[in-house]
């Protein structure tokens, strides 16, 4: 653990060192006004203070490491660990020195270009304008060099999420059109347009081979039926669970006007059985409640029946995959590119972005009539909203993507880290999520997670949060509701909390390794 902490300190120190060199190199030989001088002096003092602090941490960590290894394992092991530490530091230093060499060459080239242009004859006002523009460009480009280094240094997955998400969305939209035609004279749920949710549609899927394209299909009651949501017990997880009660409604007035259906409430059962399709209560319900598993099997049959009617079926292949609470399948394009698609379904809460859905829960057993509350649509909408607010070179999705990669094999879920990032996006100024802030934001995520672990509390982003953007439509009781603690299990189980703290240290080591080795 000490080696990891030291390596992280080395990275932080040289990050600040690069920033300090860039900051001072930017304005050498330039005329500065008083405000710029004061701002640069404050920045220089901050960088100096930070580097001094990190040097002290390095010295203290080295002393603690030497003392610990001497006490526990003797001189030989201490020497071995110290050599390992020096190896970590060597590669960190070597990488940063190479970066510094490249930056110095770049700055020298820029300086020559500026000197050459200044020799040309021009008016005084034109020359001042050119110098100001060059100064602004140098400032932006130089600060961005460190962020560009990490963007090129880390081996990011090669993806074309925007294109693939659109391909999948078009396919599902075609499915929905065919479904509606097949179900036009039935009393099955009415299918609304699908909504892309999850990491792929949010733009941060970690690895190409792990991508699952998830879409939620809203269900609305058919004619003569109504849906009523009933809040159930929370049970084994802190998530809110619902049941969807299906109720028959009188359609006698509609029957008299249009003569298109018989009233389920006021016509004899024999006549209904003979002249009309069965009600939803007799097809997809258990008792009076909509059944998730029955609905999943119904979707499964619809997909198989509708596939031959789609234009894609002439060149693509369809393979159905097992799933108890959703409809999951794989499609293979003519070029052998595959997409795994999961169609979930849900019922909207009023006119909000919150649904009760068929998604899986963390509980060991989930009754088939239980519909967990889903925030997936609101989360996807939040990230779309942020995409329109953040700078063009924002790295917030890269942060999520990087953590999703190093979380593999660790007990923390990607949802936990996504919740942390959403909280930070809502508090840190959006201008602070540029590419050049990548390392700082990665550290902020770790600090936020550690504080939540120490306090055994991570608040859900939507439930009980008064700072949710207004663009997200929430039910009226959400902002005044009691905050939902996603770490409630750590309060109840000391062993789980101890294990979570150990896994945090593992995550810290993986982050250090990612920043140093790029993988």
Image (cartoon, grey):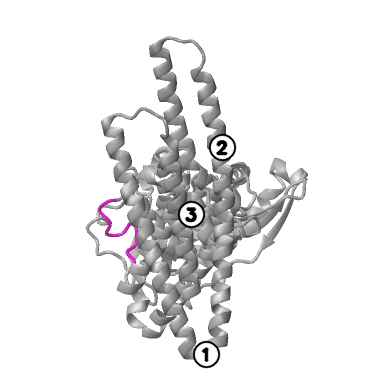
Name the residue carrying label 3. Answer: 399
* x and y percentages locating residue 430 in the rendered image: 37, 44
- Residue 338 at least partly seen: yes
In the rendered structure, which disc, 2 or 3, sits on the residue that comes first in sequence?
A: 2
The residue under the point 51% across, 62% down is 284
In the rendered structure, which disc, 1 or 2, sits on the residue that comes first in sequence?
A: 1
In the drawing, does residue 405 fall left or right of residue 131? right
Most common SS among magenta residues: loop
Query: Circle 3 sits in a helix, a strand or a loop, which is it?
Result: helix
Name the residue carrying label 1. Answer: 74
Q: Return the residue nearer the eye: 370 or 125.
A: 125
- Residue 205 at least partly seen: no
Name the residue carrying label 2. Answer: 106
Q: Eyeballing the image, is 57 above or below 393?
A: below
Looking at the rendering, the stretch of residues picked out in magenta corresponds to: 458-467
In the drawing, does residue 73 fall left or right of residue 416? right
The residue under the point 73% across, 50% down is 337
């Amino acid at each position: 653990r000490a080696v990891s902490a030291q390596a992280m300190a080395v990275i932080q120190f040289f990050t600040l060192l690069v920033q300090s060199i860039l900051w001072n190199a930017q304005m050498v030989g330039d005329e500065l006004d008083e405000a710029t001088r004061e701002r640069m002096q404050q920045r220089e003092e901050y960088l100096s203070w930070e580097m001094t602090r990190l040097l002290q941490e390095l010295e203290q960590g080295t002393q603690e490491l030497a003392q610990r290894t001497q006490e526990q394992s003797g001189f030989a092991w201490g020497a071995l660990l110290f050599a390992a530490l020096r190896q970590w530091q060597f590669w960190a230093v070597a990488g940063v020195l190479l970066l510094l060499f490249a930056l110095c060459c770049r700055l020298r080239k820029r300086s020559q270009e500026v000197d050459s242009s200044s020799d040309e004859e021009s008016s005084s006002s034109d020359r001042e304008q050119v110098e100001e523009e060059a100064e602004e460009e140098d400032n932006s480009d130089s600060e961005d060099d460190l962020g560009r280094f990490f963007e090129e240094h880390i081996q990011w997955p090669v993806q074309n999420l925007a294109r693939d998400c659109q391909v999948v969305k078009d396919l599902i939209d075609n499915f929905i059109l065919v479904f509606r035609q097949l179900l036009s004279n039935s009393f099955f749920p009415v299918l609304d347009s699908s909504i892309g949710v999850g990491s792929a549609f949010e733009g941060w899927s970690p690895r190409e081979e792990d991508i699952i394209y998830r879409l939620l299909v809203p269900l609305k009651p058919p004619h003569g039926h109504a849906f009523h949501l009933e809040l159930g017990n929370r049970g084994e997880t802190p998530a809110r669970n619902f049941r969807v009660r299906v109720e028959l409604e009188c359609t006698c007035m509609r029957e008299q006007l249009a003569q298109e259906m018989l009233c389920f409430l006021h016509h004899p059962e024999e006549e209904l059985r003979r002249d009309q399709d069965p009600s939803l209560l007799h097809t997809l319900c258990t008792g009076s409640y909509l059944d998730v598993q029955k609905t999943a099997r119904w979707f499964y049959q619809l997909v198989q029946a509708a596939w031959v009617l789609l234009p894609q079926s002439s060149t693509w292949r369809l393979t159905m995959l097992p799933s108890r609470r959703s409809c999951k399948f794989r499609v293979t394009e003519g070029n052998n590119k595959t997409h795994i698609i999961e169609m979930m379904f849900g019922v909207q809460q009023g006119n909000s972005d919150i649904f009760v859905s068929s998604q899986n829960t963390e509980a060991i057993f989930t009754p088939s009539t239980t519909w967990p509350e889903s925030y997936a649509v609101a989360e996807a909408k939040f990230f779309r909203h942020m995409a329109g607010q953040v700078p063009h070179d924002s790295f917030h999705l890269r942060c999520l993507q990087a953590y999703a990669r190093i979380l593999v094999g660790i007990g923390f879920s990607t949802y936990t880290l996504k919740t942390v990032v959403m909280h930070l996006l809502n508090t840190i100024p959006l201008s602070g999520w540029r590419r050049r802030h990548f390392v700082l934001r990665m550290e902020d995520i770790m600090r936020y997670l550690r504080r939540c672990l120490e306090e055994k509390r991570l608040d859900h982003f939507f439930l009980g949060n008064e700072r949710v953007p207004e663009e997200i439509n929430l039910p009226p009781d959400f902002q005044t509701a009691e905050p939902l603690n996603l770490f409630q299990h750590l309060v109840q189980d000391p062993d789980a909390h101890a294990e979570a703290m150990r896994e945090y240290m593992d995550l810290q080591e993986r982050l250090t390794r990612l920043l140093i080795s790029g993988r």
